[in-house]
Image: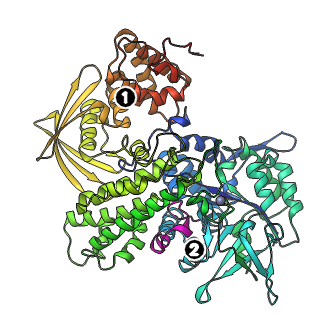
Amino acid sequence: MPPLAGFHLHLYQPPREDPWLGVVTNEWSAWPYHDWNERIATECYRALIAVAVTNGDETATELVEPLTMSSTDIGPTLHRWLEQCSPDVDQALSYQVDHANSGPQSLMIAAPLVHAIIPLANADDRERLVAWGIADYRRRFGATPLGMWLPETAVDLASLDCLARQGIQYTVLMPTQVLRVREPGAEWRTVDANSLDTSKAYFVRLAQGRTINVVFGHGSLSQRVAFGDLIDDGIALADEMAGALDGEDGAVLLVADGETYGHHHHFGDLGLAWALRRLRHHYGFETTLGVWLARREPTYEVELAEVSSWSCAHGVERWRSDCGCVTGEQPGWRQTWREPLRESLDWLRATLGGAVDQALAEYLHSSGEALLQYGTVLSGEVDPHDFVAARAVRDLDAAEVALVLEFCEVHRNLLYSFTSCAWFFADPAEIETSIVLRYAAVALGIVRRTLGKDYEPEFLEHLGGVHSNRPGIGGSVLWALACDPFRFDEERIAAGFAAERLACVGHARIERGYWRARAEMVESDPAELRVTLTNTLTFREREFRTSSQRTGHLGIRVRVDDGTAIREVSLGELGADVIARVGASWLAGTGSADYEEALNLLVARVLANPAGEDEVAVLVALAGAPRYVTPIGEASIRRAIVAIAGQNPAPDLSIVAPLAKALGMSSVVTREATSVPPIRFS
Ligand SMILES: [Zn+2]
């Protein structure tokens, strides 16, 4: 039984899809990538699947697969994105895990469905986060997880007991989280991060005779990999790990964010691969925690700090108060916004959750038990209709089934609104806090429509205590900035399907994010449709009669009639993904998905003809459509921005501003600019 010298990789990104549509929205700050996940997937996740390393004298190259030699957790919100947007990574990982000798349970550990601070969740949510994470793991890897990662390694006894009751056998923590240890038959001994012997696995005693095992990462080496330059030299890293091993049966486990290897540290994937190869083949060590742990029954007991985490020295205060732990701080900034943000969302959880639970009780035998099992629906293990039918108090019709699923979705969106990143950074006027507010808005919207109760004004009163460090951005402004550009109603979604049908014809989508449409032509006219819109999460259905008309060169107008009211939707309201598809069809040919060619053709057009708001909308949508904008596309975008900004009068350029900022061209679109500064096209 060789000792363990290996790595645990915590791979995670917050959810990036627009929670109304289910479509991943563009993040200009990740330019020239579509969004941060695309960027990190290229730098890190795809790299970690297989790393090419040469042998000592560089006469041969071999592929090392770090993920099959390590312990890894992948946050379900990231894994879902990989499955949908980088399926090569997801499929290669599945193949590697399926074919590894040690099996999925030793390589992959589970994670709660949402990256929420478990000790701060209420008792019901704590159980659901864990149960839904286990369901997600079971569907992906075909096995029950043995280990579970706790977001931010945030832990208290109630969290550990929740894991143990749900069958989890171990978790990974850091040495700063420990208070005392006890050898078999000996007295308790107080330890700290420096004196804890991390070469052993420990157990924690829980209620009613339950226990859970804990493995601690090596403090200083993990720190030096994450925040120093130790990963730059894989050979030296492996030798340091070997030197740190104490005894023939011990462990040195380096624990860090998976993004350390390639994203935070460029070429960190290479350092990891070199280190793993040396640890395994030169030293003959075990590198996989799950394999090492499976052959051991921990006999040392550990007592943890009452509540703790790996990125806050004050327990879990970082996610509810101005404790001083912060990333991205500016001089004079405070994090007094954290407490009212937590309080607001706790209030919303209690208020909406209570209203929905009461409503659910009219349809289901035990709404609490049903919600605990809802993770099997989210994972795809159980058909949503079967899920409802098995728990219904009577036969429910289709509309009632949809209603039950909508109530479950309120709880899911509320859970997503506790994504920990919202509190992690220095200011709430950032993308991470915006994301959780959007989930809160979706939950509010469902309750408003289904129960006729509008809690938004009251929620905004609570949010009033949240102030950005940037002047003039209080709770209600923050709310508007976060949500208004993203809110989608069903009329606009139906209009999007109708617009694609007119412009893209046979290439029009029938599924878009969470939505599916069945469109039937009225009197064989592709402009006149009967659209049946279905939400694929809740099976809520709506019927619309749509009438679409091309306007001008690039524009479109869709008239949407639900039988009670008529709505006119213009191109700019359709959503960037639809605008890009419609624009590409009309610029580069029906059904074209060649966004770069469409961009080039758009430039040719705006050089010759004054651009209006349709051209501006198409420019921004096409710029944001590809997974990666090539230098050719970028040159076209730069030319188009300069050309449009130079028009007299220029159209409204506000929607171009974020794109121009990403390209370092903000001054070009600012009206105050008296002359256009020189732009480097090279
Ligand atoms: Zn702190």
Q: Is mark 2 within 8 Å of ligand 1?
A: no
Residue depicted at x 38% and y 71%: 371
Quarter of the picture holding the N terminus: bottom right
Residue 538 position within the rendered picture, expressed as x and y whole percent measured from the top left:
30, 59
Identify the residue position indicated by label 1 in the image.
Answer: 592
* Left or right relative to 634: residue 199: right
Q: Residues within 10 Å of mark 2 (few under 14, many from 20)?
A: many
Observer-nearest of 207 and 534? 207
| Residue for badge 2 | 159
Magenta region = 110-128
Which quadrant of the rendered structure holds the C terminus? top right
**Which residue is drawn at the image coordinates 38% and 55% (left, top)?**
461
Q: Is residue 418 left or right of residue 319?
A: left
- Separation of residues labelled 1 and 2 (CA atoms): 51 Å
Residue 168 placement, left or right of 264: left
Q: Position of residue 345 (x, y in %)?
A: 44, 60
On residue 377, which mark appears? none
Left or right: residue 355 versus residue 189 is: left
